[in-house]
Amino acid sequence: MSFAVKPTLTGTSTVLRPFTGADADVMGEILQDPDVVRFTFEPSDGPLTREDLRAWYGSRSARTDRLDLAVTDRATGELVGEVVLNEWDPDARSCNFRTLIGPRGRGRGLGTEAVRLIVGHGFEQLGLRRVELAAYGNNTRALRVYEKAGFVVEGVRREVRMRDGEWTDEVLMAVLDREWAALSSTAR
């Protein structure tokens, strides 16, 4: 298994494609969205510069230890977010999953389809056995998307981060290859 090949995955409403340095400006805007900051991270070393973003997104295609794909609206080609398979564990044939969708990509099913496309690729093309994630408990929109894609809650790490002045739980979820296969066969 290798993340060296960076595929283009096409769905009904979305296209997942490899990143380029040219995506840095749009991703910079998305990363500043209040919901993205609230539900994903806060840069610890201050804001990312345009050069930082160009270097980061420009280097994604060369990485063989992870798969970062741009989420685009199929109808317009507009970049609306990202999906990532990372933290590959070859002994367990598992990896971590994360995603973020900016404001112009929300509420239209693009995130749900993007999750299904990359997770399906992980199981069907890369031979993964398990895909796991962690999400803040107050990110109800993302939790619904993950459940629709077949992820199951495995646990909760209580009050792990202070967010918006309140302690927030972290929900641990995963989907296994056999669960994905069962979901995929009923969706046909």
Image: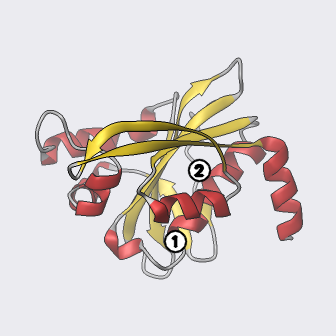
Q: Is residue 124 positioned above or below 59 on the image?
A: below
Write the residue at 82% across / 59% down: 183
Q: Is residue 7 positioned above or below 103 on the image?
A: above
Is residue 32 in view from this perspective? yes
Q: Position of residue 78 (x, y in %)?
A: 38, 73
Of 9 and 116, which appears nearest the observer? 116
Q: Give residue 7's mark.
A: 2
Write the residue at 50% across / 57% down: 17
Q: Is residue 186 positioned above or below 177 on the image?
A: below
Q: Give residue 110's mark.
A: 1
Write the residue at 29% across / 62% down: 35
Callout 1, which amino acid? Leu
Q: Give residue 175's mark.
A: none
Q: Position of residue 136 (x, y in %)?
A: 42, 48
Callout 2, which amino acid? Pro
Write the residue at 66% across / 64% down: 148
Q: Quadrant of residue 112?
A: bottom right
Q: Is 26 on the left or on the right of 63, as rendered?
A: left
The mark nearer the N terminus, 2 or 1, is 2
| On-image quarter of the C terminus | bottom right
Of 95 and 173, which appears nearest the observer? 173
